[in-house]
């Protein structure tokens, strides 16, 4: 009986141990890679891009005297509106007036010498014809007359130069402008070529923007653009592209200028503005719809460009399918897909190189980039 009792105890212990082992077996739970995604939509209107720029005058220039001197009269002040030919500033001109008077005296003397030399030549000519003067006398008289005539011409040019120098002491407006800056004042000595006034001219100002290299070829002169000011972003103004740069400036961007067509008085030099370009007219439409996807969603291998389309598989699980596509134009908001993608499909937007064809994934709660 004792032996049987021990065997029963051992049997029960074994059964308990087996049951305990069965309960402790781990349950394997399948995990899925979470992916960021975006829903592809027709982005035909998204080929419009906006760039910030600075308002400049139609003509923004510094005026300077062509001679040096002391400013003795400033007839304009900051913000004045001036007309073409209006006197803006003048230099003390006594020295230049004296130079003109000296040149006039030299010219009178040269003319007197010319008259005497001419009369002498005529007199020697008569004597030579009557055999009362030698050939050398005639040649000398002729040379004296010609030299006196040349001296008169030189004196006349010197007078013109002196008069021109005198006129340079007066600075006049080249056209109807506004005084943007006063750089010199009365009694101040200025050198020739030194800026004394800054003027803004033209009926309408222009907006200068810097365009990245991927967009510059899509911009041509006479393109119509829309302009908004940072102070009043709700109001839209029309403008036309007047200049397109052919050489890149700092940062690899190209300068482009847009000339305002209306409400010109609402913009002042130095203000910031936004210029909106519509590139749809320049982008070739190879499909009925313009589909643009984020740059990070497109990969490339030896077969070409591809992306991963996310297709419903089971419940919240999606299957990532590798699909090759043909890409088109590049834009600031993404790259154009010409063929291989349909509107409404979901695509992975990040970690494309870590995905495998047919991999089961789960989507994040919401697309990180929003509807595209």
Image (tube, rainbow, N blue to C red):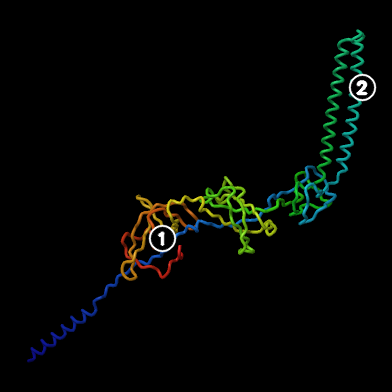
Dot 2: element: helix
Residue 140 rendering spot, x and y as whole percentages: 86, 16
Residue at the extreme front of the image, as rendered? 288
Q: Which residue is mark 2?
A: 116
Q: Nearer the viewer, residue 267 or 20?
A: 267
Residue at 83% from the left image edge and 46% from the top image edge: 91
State the image coordinates of residue 151 (x, y, percent, origin top left).
Answer: 85, 26
Frontmost of labels 2 and 1 is 1
Give the answer, above or below, for where 19 lies relative to 274. Answer: below
Q: Would residue 321 be found to the left or right of residue 6 on screen?
A: right
Q: Quadrant of residue 262?
A: bottom right
SS under mark 1: loop
Which corner quadrant of the image does residue 35 belong to?
bottom left
For the residues labelled 2 and 1, the Cα–Cα distance comes to 100 Å
Q: Earlier in the sequence, mark 2 or mark 1?
A: 2
Residue 197 coordinates in the image, percent (x, y): 76, 51
Q: Residue at x 86, y 46 (%)?
A: 92
Q: Position of residue 209 (x, y in %)?
A: 60, 53
The residue wearing badge 1 is 343
């Amino acid at each position: 009986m004792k032996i049987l009792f021990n065997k029963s105890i051992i049997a029960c212990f074994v059964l308990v141990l087996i049951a305990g082992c069965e309960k402790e077996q781990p349950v394997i739970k399948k995990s899925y890679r979470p992916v960021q995604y975006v829903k592809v939509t027709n982005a035909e209107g998204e080929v419009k891009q906006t760039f910030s720029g600075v308002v400049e005058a139609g003509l923004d220039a510094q005026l300077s005297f062509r001679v040096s001197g002391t400013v003795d009269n400033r007839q304009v002040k900051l913000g004045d509106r001036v007309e073409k030919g209006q006197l803006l500033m003048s230099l003390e001109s006594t020295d230049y007036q004296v130079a003109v008077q000296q040149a006039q005296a030299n010219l009178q003397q040269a003319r007197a010498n010319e008259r005497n030399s001419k009369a002498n030549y005529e007199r020697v000519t008569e004597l030579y014809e009557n055999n009362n003067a030698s050939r050398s006398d005639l040649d000398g008289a002729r040379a004296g007359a010609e030299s006196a005539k040349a001296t008169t011409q030189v004196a006349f040019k010197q007078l013109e130069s002196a008069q021109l120098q005198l006129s340079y002491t007066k600075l006049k407006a080249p056209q109807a402008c506004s005084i943007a800056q006063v750089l010199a004042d009365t009694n101040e000595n200025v050198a020739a070529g030194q800026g004394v006034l800054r003027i803004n001219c033209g009926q309408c100002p222009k907006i200068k923007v810097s365009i990245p290299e991927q967009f510059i070829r899509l911009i041509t002169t006479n393109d119509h653009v829309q302009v908004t000011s940072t102070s009043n972003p709700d109001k839209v103004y029309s403008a036309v592209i007047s200049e397109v740069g052919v050489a890149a400036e700092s940062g690899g961007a190209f300068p482009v200028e847009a000339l305002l067509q209306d409400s010109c008085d609402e913009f002042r030099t130095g203000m910031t503005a936004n210029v909106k370009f519509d590139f749809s007219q320049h982008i070739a439409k190879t499909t009925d719809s313009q589909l643009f996807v984020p740059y990070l969603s497109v990969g490339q291998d030896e077969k070409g460009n591809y992306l991963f389309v996310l297709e419903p598989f089971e419940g919240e699980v999606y299957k990532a399918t590798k699909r090759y596509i043909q890409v088109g134009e590049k834009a600031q908001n993404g790259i154009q897909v010409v063929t291989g993608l349909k509107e409404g499909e979901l695509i992975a937007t990040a970690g494309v190189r870590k995905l495998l064809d047919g991999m089961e994934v789960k989507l994040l709660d919401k697309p990180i980039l929003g509807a595209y």
